[in-house]
Image (tube, rainbow, N blue to C red):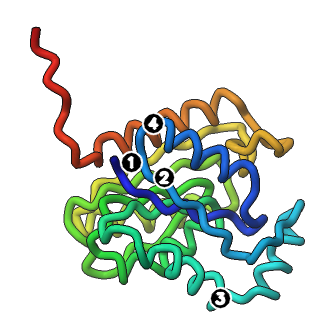
Amino acid sequence: MTHVVLLHSVLGLRPVELLAAERLRRAGHDVVAPDLFGGVAANTLDEGFGLLNRVGWDTVTRRARSALEDMPVDTVLAGVSMGAGVVSALLPERTATAGVLLLHATAELPAGSRPGLPLQLHAADPDPFAPPERVAALEVAARRYGAALEIFRHPGVGHFYTDPGSPEHDAAAAELTWARVVDFLDRLDPRPAPDIRP
């Protein structure tokens, strides 16, 4: 079982994150999806950034840290859009994390990141929250620190292509993304592989 904290987007904790968490649990992983906005959500990015301004970044990151207090030190940090920024804030403090998942946005790798740290990025192409220069910077940092970075871009889909409730939803791209996420978590699972010899 891989332990995961799934950090929501600037729209707040919504069905897309709850459904994703449930899917990962069905795949055998332990997932928490904390509400970083304290029970409020938004319908548009403008509303979401307004919520973020009212709640405050310090409160958002404090709630994320609180959600991790009882989680193992190797808990995977997974961020959806704004949540990728929260991952950036937490990663310097969570050096034993088993891996990092970034959905719909990039994150910054802190100096001295662990060699071999597994990272996976999933984003539309193009995506304003994963522009070429930020993706390139992530690649440079991954090479510098020896992180194991995988990048998956989906041409022609919208920013929130994994969200069934969004007009940007793309079922095929979303299914492929979640299949790759499950594979990523399965590879991090510390349990030994089953013995399938006859």
CA–CA distance in space, label 1 to label 2: 6 Å
User: What number is the disc on residue 59?
Assistant: 3
Q: Earlier in the sequence, mark 4 or mark 1?
A: 4
- Give left or right: position of 165 versus 65: right
Q: Amino acid at mark 1?
A: Glu
- Cβ–Cβ under 8 Å for marks 3 and 2: no
Q: Residue 10 is drawn in which quadrant?
A: bottom right
156 relative to 40 in the view: left or right: left
Q: Nearer the viewer, mark 1 or mark 3?
A: 3
Q: Estimate the spatial distance between the alpha carbons at disc 3 and disc 2, rounded to whole Å.
A: 26 Å
Q: Secondary structure at mark 4?
A: loop
**Disc with the residue nearer the chain's start (1 vs 2):** 2
Task: Name the element at disc 1.
Answer: strand
Of labels 3 and 4, the one closer to you: 4
Left or right: 30 in relation to 49:
left
Whether tag 1 and tag 2 are in contact, CB under 8 A, the answer is: yes
Residue 84 rendering spot, x and y as whole percentages: 55, 67
Sooner in the amino-acid sequence: mark 3 or mark 4: 4
**In the rendering, at what x and y percent does residue 21 appear?**
57, 49
C-alpha distance separating marks 3 and 4 = 31 Å
Residue at mark 1: 150
Sequence order check, earlier mark of 1 and 3: 3
Q: Residue 24: x and y, percent?
A: 50, 43
- Residue behind mark 2: 121
Callout 2–callout 4 Cβ contact below 8 Å: no
Instruction: Identify whether 5 is placed above or below 93.
Output: above
For the residues marked 1 and 3, what is the alpha-carbon distance in whole angstroms? Answer: 31 Å
For the point 48% across and 52% down, which residue is it?
A: 121
